[in-house]
Image (spheres, rainbow, N blue to C red):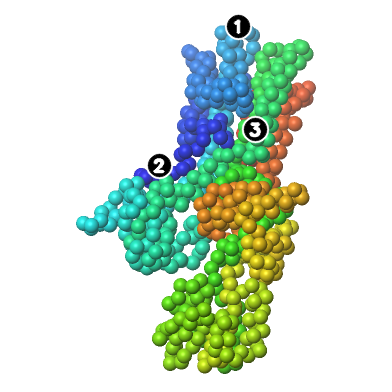
């Protein structure tokens, strides 16, 4: 895609973070080096005297055939082995010897020893075929490794492909097709039916349903009209939209998601630091074991070439290659899985620590609730249906901008009710509103309206109003001819997803608390309805972080979930800060994890993903390092008395096999149930 480089954050990774021994390398480079080295290795192996003896055949002899091994082996060492030698130089320059150092030491010892033999300075067998096969197998292992890592990051690459290359920009003289990179804030673009939105923006003209599933996971198309925001890469429905650009290229939400996920994949967690330390320790152990192997066999009277082959085999089989892959590959896969499930991992420590959570604290408004008023309960008098009462109330409040009035109107819209027109609208100061609807006169208002109208209220409606008041909810009455027809309990509506989220957290053994500045009665009502364990009500913004600290001092691992500016200190203080994606930029920046879909049900998924990721890391670390307990003694020749010996090439096969096992095991994380 032509413009991908301009908005693909993956290209901006820190080359020294994560799996840094491959900085500047690509799967294609290792692939090309492997195939050419493999082709050159075939004649080296075929004309090797050792292999001919083992397999009981005789290769054709001709003038110079004795130099096939030295010449082609040297080419393989220089061409195929140079990448390892450069990697070792970087490791040693950083004083952090690792797998590249071990590989380079093994192939360099084999190369120098073989030339010493070839020149007749030592009477022994050269190691040309072992050297060539060792380099080829190492290249194959690194090629497989890099392909696995890039496949794990494939979700990000696929997201990048979703952005179109061009857009239709609307100007005073008409329309023009321009590259997306040429768009600027304030430009107007035309999005035709079926096209992908090229930028973030605000609808200036038109109405359509947009498919936002690739970003939010919401399967149903979302209605967009004048004034609504649209997101780059979402798919337009059947209507045409004119959109004012608010963000293009690297400034879109899609690019932000890609950038943060890429950064999370390259950031180092405690587990990665542990793996790095283990790799360095294993490198030292391997070099010491190799030196000891050489010394012991020489003291035991073995030939020099036999001792060197044992030493090289130890160096090769102990290479912590799989250990270096064990954690980065799991992290790359887990962060990609998180992104596909609405979990944007900004800091890997958040994903790593989620498995330890004891308490999840939710901010109420905008997190557990919609942050908007709705009719949350209602009661009607005999002869009146809930639908009729609600649509008449919505007609009366249709022209009002009061939050409670808008809540009644939105509830009618949510229920797809046909709201009739209201005539003769008038406001009753301090009491409510009045209008004529479908030929009848109605009034709507709070308790003050009842006194003014001397209204008659059935016991059922009065009980419902008292119950609403006890929950801190507003009770709004619908009257006709001073007779109460209905009472509406209006409050900040609870998200339907919140109930499922809290049940799922309880199943995972996690305590759930709510933190809010609302009155105790309001907070208790919401907590009771949701089945929460603890309520912190009437908490000032500056005290929210202090509540988090109180729980932490009690030895609890705490996650804070919030969406507002006043939640940012608590998000930063918590062991894990989880920001609602639809919240403020400040809250998002303070969080370790961002819920892209603003769906609290994704929090239990975070816990499950964290636990599955940790299990997979442990499995990989054991696969990567544990086999050396048997492999190093075997490579050193402890079973030589029984003629059981490993060649350097076979050692490379075993080492590469452990790498492949680690890569395959990491891929199985994709099957984890969240």
Image location of residue 642, percent across then percent down:
78, 25
Q: Is residue 404 above or below residue 387?
A: above
Q: Which residue is mark 2?
A: 5
For label 1, the crowd category at 10 Å Cα-Cα, with few meaning under 14, some 14 to 19 and many 20 or more, is few
Q: Quadrant of the C terminus?
A: bottom right
Residue located farthest toward the left when viewing the structure as drawn: 173
* Residue at 64% across, 12% down: 124
**Label drawn at residue 121:** 1
Of pointers 1 and 2, the one earlier in the residue sequence: 2
Q: Is residue 299 above or below residue 55?
A: above
Q: Is residue 55 visible?
A: no
Disc 3 on helix, strand or loop? helix
**Label drawn at residue 276:** 3
Discs 1/3, front: 3
For label 3, the crowd category at 10 Å Cα-Cα, with few meaning under 14, some 14 to 19 and many 20 or more, is many
Give yes or no for contact between labels 3 and 2 (Cβ–Cβ under 8 Å): no
Disc 2 on helix, strand or loop? helix
For label 2, the crowd category at 10 Å Cα-Cα, with few meaning under 14, some 14 to 19 and many 20 or more, is some
Considering depth in this image, is 344 or 388 the residue closer to the camera?
388
* Residue at 58% across, 18% down: 108
Image location of residue 52, percent across then percent down:
60, 22
| C-alpha distance separating marks 1 and 2 | 55 Å
| C-alpha distance separating marks 1 and 3 | 40 Å
């Amino acid at each position: 895609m032509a413009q991908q480089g301009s908005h693909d954050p993956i290209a901006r990774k820190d080359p020294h973070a994560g799996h840094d021994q491959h900085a500047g390398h690509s799967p294609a480079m290792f692939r090309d080096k492997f195939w050419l080295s493999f082709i050159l290795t075939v004649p080296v192996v075929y004309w090797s005297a050792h292999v001919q003896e083992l397999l009981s055949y005789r290769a054709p002899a001709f003038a110079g055939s004795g130099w096939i091994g030295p010449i082609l082996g040297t080419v393989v060492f220089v061409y195929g082995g140079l990448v390892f030698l450069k990697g070792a130089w970087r490791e040693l320059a950083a004083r952090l010897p690792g797998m590249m150092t071990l590989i380079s030491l093994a192939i360099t010892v084999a190369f120098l020893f073989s030339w010493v033999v070839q020149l007749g300075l030592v009477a022994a067998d050269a190691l040309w075929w072992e050297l060539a096969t060792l380099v080829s197998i190492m290249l194959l292992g690194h090629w497989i490794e890099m392909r696995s890592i890039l496949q794990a990051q494939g979700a990000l690459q696929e997201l990048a492909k979703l952005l179109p290359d061009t857009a239709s920009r609307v100007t005073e003289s008409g329309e023009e097709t321009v590259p997306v990179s040429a768009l600027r804030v304030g430009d107007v673009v035309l999005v035709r039916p079926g096209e992908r939105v090229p930028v973030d923006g605000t609808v200036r003209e038109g109405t359509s349903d947009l498919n936002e599933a690739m970003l939010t996971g919401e399967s149903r198309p979302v209605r967009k009209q004048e004034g609504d925001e649209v997101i780059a890469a979402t798919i337009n429905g059947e209507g045409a939209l004119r959109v004012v650009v608010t963000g293009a290229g690297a400034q879109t939400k899609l690019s932000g998601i890609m950038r943060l996920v890429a950064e999370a994949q390259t950031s180092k967690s405690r587990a990665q630091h542990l793996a790095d330390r283990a790799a360095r320790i294993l490198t030292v152990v391997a070099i010491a074991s190799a030196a000891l192997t050489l010394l012991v066999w020489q003291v035991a009277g073995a030939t020099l070439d036999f001792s060197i082959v044992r030493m090289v085999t130890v160096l090769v089989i102990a290479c912590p290659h799989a250990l270096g892959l064990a954690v980065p590959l799991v992290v790359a896969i887990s962060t990609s899985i998180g992104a596909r499930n609405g979990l944007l991992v900004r800091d890997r420590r958040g994903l790593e620590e989620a498995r330890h959570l004891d308490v999840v604290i939710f901010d109420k408004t905008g997190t557990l609730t919609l942050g908007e008023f709705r009719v949350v309960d209602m009661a009607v008098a005999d002869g009146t249906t809930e639908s009729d009462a609600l649509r008449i109330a919505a007609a009366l409040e249709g022209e009002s901008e009061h939050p409670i009035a808008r809540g009644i109107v939105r509830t009618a819209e949510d229920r797809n009710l046909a709201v009739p027109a209201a005539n003769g609208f008038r406001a009753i100061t301090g009491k409510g509103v009045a209008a004529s609807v479908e030929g009848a006169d109605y009034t709507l208002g709070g308790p003050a309206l009842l006194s003014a109208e001397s209204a008659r209220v059935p016991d059922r409606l009065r009980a419902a109003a008292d119950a609403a008041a006890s929950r801190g909810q507003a009770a709004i009455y619908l009257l006709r001819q001073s007779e109460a027809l209905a009472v509406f309990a209006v409050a900040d509506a609870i998200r339907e997803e919140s109930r499922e989220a809290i049940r799922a957290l309880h199943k995972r053994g996690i305590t759930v608390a709510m933190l809010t500045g609302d009155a105790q009665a309001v907070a208790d009502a919401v907590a009771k309805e949701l089945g929460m364990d603890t309520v912190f009500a009437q908490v000032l913004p500056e005290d929210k972080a202090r509540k988090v600290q109180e729980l932490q001092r009690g030895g609890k691992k705490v996650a804070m979930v919030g969406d507002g500016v006043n939640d940012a200190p608590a998000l930063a203080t918590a062991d894990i800060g989880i920001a609602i994606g639809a919240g403020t930029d400040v809250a998002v920046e303070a969080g370790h994890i961002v819920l892209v879909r603003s769906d609290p049900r994704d929090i239990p998924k975070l816990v499950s993903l964290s636990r599955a990721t940790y299990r997979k890391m442990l499995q990989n670390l054991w696969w990567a390092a544990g086999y050396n307990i048997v492999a190093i003694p075997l490579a050193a020749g402890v079973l030589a008395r029984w003629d059981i010996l490993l060649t350097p090439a076979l050692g490379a096969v075993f080492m590469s096999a452990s790498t492949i096992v680690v890569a395959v095991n990491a891929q199985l994380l994709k099957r984890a149930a969240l």
